[in-house]
Amino acid sequence: MHRLWAPWRRAYVEGAAGGAAPACFLCDYAVEGSDAERGIVWRWPSWYAVLNAYPYSNGHLMLVLTRHHEGFVGLSADEASTMAPALSRCEAVLRHAYAPQGLNIGVNVGRAAGAGAVGHLHVHFVPRWNGDTNFMSTIGETRVLPEGLADSYARLRAGFEHSAG
């Protein structure tokens, strides 16, 4: 049996085991400061875009509601009216920066639906390419990512800085 050591995932695994609800890291990220360290590539009123620390593919981005709120019901008028332009901007930057052949864009609301950040609305953008699922993912249950998070951050940050809006 092969082992892939990933000690940085310990906090996530322990938090997923149950017990007391941990502090919401997405709420912590909403507070300005340390954006590069946290992987935040763009801020806009009511929303921010952050790299997923455990990406499915390079460029895996999340658009996050600034306040702690689960789902779409109960969004303020401002949050609702700025959501579509924010989603559009994330898609445009990813398409320009990575030229993917497709995108998975999705929302998981609640732990039972697979949400990792329970109670905090966020939308995943996963760039996809034909043939990007190979034997490593299928048989070895291991993802091979050819670009480091720091490089993904630099690429996407530049994309948001140079895009319109």
Image (cartoon, rainbow, N blue to C red):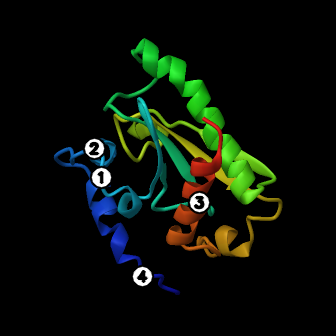
In whole angstroms, how far apart are the C-alphas of marks 1 and 2? 7 Å
Q: Please say if the residues under marks 4 and 2 sit with CB atoms less than 8 Å apart.
A: no
Which of 147/128 is in front?
A: 147
Which of 29/127 is in front?
A: 29
In primary-sequence order, the first of circles 4 and 2 is 4
Name the residue beneath numbered marker 1.
Answer: 33
Image quadrant where residue 120 sits: top left
Residue 13 percent location from the top left of the image: 33, 61
In whole angstroms, how far apart are the C-alphas of marks 4 and 3? 17 Å
The disc placed on residue 5 is: 4
**What residue is drawn where x is 67% and y is 42%?**
91
In whole angstroms, how far apart are the C-alphas of marks 3 and 2? 26 Å
Which of 86/64 is in front?
A: 86
* Label 2 CA crowd tier, 10 Å (few <14, some 14–19, many 20+): few
**What residue is drawn where x is 41% and y is 29%?**
46
Task: Tell me the kind of residue under disc 4.
Answer: Trp
Task: Tell me the kind of residue under disc 1.
Answer: Gly
**What residue is drawn where x is 45% and y is 61%?**
53
Dot 1 falls on a residue whose secondary structure is loop
Dot 2 falls on a residue whose secondary structure is loop
Task: Tell me the kind of residue under disc 2.
Answer: Val
